[in-house]
């Protein structure tokens, strides 16, 4: 194979050093960037409990629409963005996206009407859409099959901890800056977090890696080894000139969407991310358990800390038994379905709070299991086809948040039977889908198609 002949792909000391170097550059960078991404998309929930609704006259239905229009913008832009990414330098493209969405996030502080907020949320979705699918593709082009679950978990842990500490940060900002210079606390929340995102975007180009064959942060020998590692697992990588024939954007798109396996992965992921909308309502749900104001925001922290404590060891286990990732996902989703059903039937404050912890844990644990399973399953595909496929999976998952966002209207408070009952059903369906995929993909896996 061109550029990799004679390179050993056994787990040598040289490879271990290479993996440590890749981790050192890649994982902290994307972790920090995802923290900003997650805070900027979900701080609307913190702004809601800090008084935004009453200040601009936002109704319950209009709040749901702010979540929906973000997802619509996100879904529209994801696939085109990953098409561009597969042929550009991630170390330049991702910071550009970040600069754009950070600016929009900060400008949300200026909204005065629900219509303005809806417009800004749609724009935020479009600007931020390329980030998550870009990271999914980058991880799939740097790590082998048995290395991906814990890396996806490391990436997504930023969302978990952002959800946890985002509540603390939001509470601190809205408490300490409310009324400063005549500006409401929730407006300061958008300003501070948006400006911080722009600052991080300016630093990101100096930290991010490009692709194994093109990055300038590795030596020629390390680039050869990085490519050989992937080829040992049958994973294609961008930039391998002479190894992978170029295909047009349209051909790659058709190859992706015409594969029935992709749509099975999409349906499974939609059941998980449809329930992901719970993150937008955690402050509201916790407030319904008897907490208020900043206290409600602080009490969301344990929901995410428990999720982190459960998700990390589960993903480490998944990398030790990579062939059984969908089995682990099935078990996790069934447990999540059970806790949703219990929450729909038990209304005492303490049990409900405990159940919320485990529902969040099931969603956050199933997410990296599903992504790593999709990534390794798609490994043999042409890089651009894989990039489009991962964007489709992520996009369809975000599309599912549209209906997930309507499951917790204020009129259902404090029981929210519709929401928890629907989530119980969704997670059960997800368990069935991943069970089917486990059997089907063993018999008929993804295959390279040039």
Image (spheres, grey):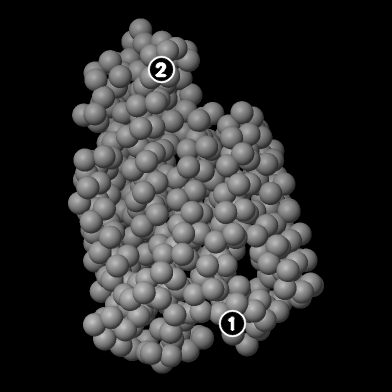
**SS for tag 1?**
loop
State how far apart marks 1 and 2 are (Cα).
Answer: 52 Å
User: Of label 1 and label 2, which has the lower sequence position?
Assistant: 2
Confirm or deny contact between disc 1 and disc 2 (CB under 8 A).
Answer: no
**Disc 1 crowd, CA 10 A, few/some/many (<14, 14-19, 20+):** some
* Residue 385 seen: no
Q: Which residue is mark 2?
A: 15
Quadrant of the image for the C terminus? Answer: top left
> In this rendering, is residue 163 above or below 204?
below
Furthest residue toward top? 6
> In this rendering, is residue 392 above or below 381?
below
Residue at (28% x, 36% y) in the render: 209
> In this rendering, is residue 393 above or below 301?
above
* Residue 182 seen: yes
Measuring from the top left, give residue 378's x and y in whole percent: 49, 38
Measuring from the top left, give residue 202's x and y in whole percent: 20, 51
Measuring from the top left, give residue 398's x and y in whole percent: 48, 61
Residue at (63% x, 34% y) in the render: 317
> In this rendering, is residue 8 above or below 327?
above
The residue nearer to you, when weighing 80 against 188, is 188
Determine the image quadrant of residue 4: top left
Determine the image quadrant of residue 12: top left
**SS for tag 2?**
helix
Q: What label does residue 175 carry, if any?
A: none
Side of 322 where 214 appears, left or right: left
Furthest residue toward front? 176
Measuring from the top left, give residue 63's x and y in whole percent: 46, 81
Side of 211 where 368 appears, left or right: right
Determine the image quadrant of residue 415: bottom right
Residue at (36% x, 74% y) in the render: 176
Q: Which residue is mark 1?
A: 409
């Amino acid at each position: 194979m061109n550029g990799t002949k004679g390179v050993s792909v056994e787990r040598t000391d040289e490879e271990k050093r290479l993996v440590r170097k890749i981790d050192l550059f890649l994982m902290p960078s994307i972790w920090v960037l995802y923290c900003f991404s997650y805070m900027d998309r979900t701080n609307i929930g913190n702004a809601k409990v800090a008084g935004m609704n009453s200040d601009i006259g936002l109704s319950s239905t209009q709040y749901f629409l702010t979540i929906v229009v973000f997802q619509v913008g996100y879904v529209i832009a994801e696939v085109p963005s990953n098409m561009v990414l597969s042929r550009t330098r991630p170390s330049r493209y991702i910071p550009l996206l970040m600069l754009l969405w950070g600016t929009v996030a900060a400008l949300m502080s200026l909204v005065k009407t629900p219509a303005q907020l809806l417009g800004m949320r749609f724009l935020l979705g479009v600007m931020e859409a390329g980030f998550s699918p870009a990271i999914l593709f980058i991880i799939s082009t740097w790590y082998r099959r048995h290395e991906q679950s814990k890396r996806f978990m490391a990436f997504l842990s930023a969302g978990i901890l952002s959800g946890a500490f985002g509540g603390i940060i939001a509470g601190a900002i809205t408490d300490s800056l409310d009324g400063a210079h005549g500006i409401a606390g929730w407006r300061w929340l958008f300003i501070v977090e948006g400006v911080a995102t722009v600052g991080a975007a300016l630093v990101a180009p100096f930290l991010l890696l490009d692709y194994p064959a093109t990055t300038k942060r590795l030596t020629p020998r390390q680039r050869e080894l990085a490519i050989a590692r992937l080829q040992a697992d049958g994973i294609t990588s961008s930039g391998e000139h002479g190894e992978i024939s170029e295909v047009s954007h349209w051909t790659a798109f058709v190859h992706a969407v015409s594969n029935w396996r992709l749509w099975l992965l999409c349906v499974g992921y939609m059941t998980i991310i449809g329930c992901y909308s719970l993150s937008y309502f955690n402050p509201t749900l916790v407030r319904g358990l008897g907490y208020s104001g900043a206290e409600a925001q602080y009490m969301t922290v344990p929901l995410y800390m428990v999720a982190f404590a459960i998700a990390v060891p589960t993903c480490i286990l998944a990398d030790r038994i990579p062939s059984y990732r969908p089995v682990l996902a099935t078990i996790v989703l069934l447990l999540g379905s059970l806790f949703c059903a219990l929450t729909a039937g038990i209304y005492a404050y303490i049990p409900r709070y405990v159940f919320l912890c485990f529902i969040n844990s099931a969603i956050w644990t199933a997410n990296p299991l599903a992504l790593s399973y999709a990534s390794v399953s798609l490994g043999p595909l042409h890089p651009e086809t894989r990039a489009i496929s991962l964007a489709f999976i992520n996009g369809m998952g975000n599309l599912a948040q549209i209906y997930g966002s309507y499951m917790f209207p204020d009129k259902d408070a404090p029981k929210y039977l519709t929401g928890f009952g629907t989530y119980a059903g969704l997670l059960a369906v997800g368990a069935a889908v991943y069970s089917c995929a486990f059997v089907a993909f063993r018999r008929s896996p993804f295959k390279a198609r040039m």
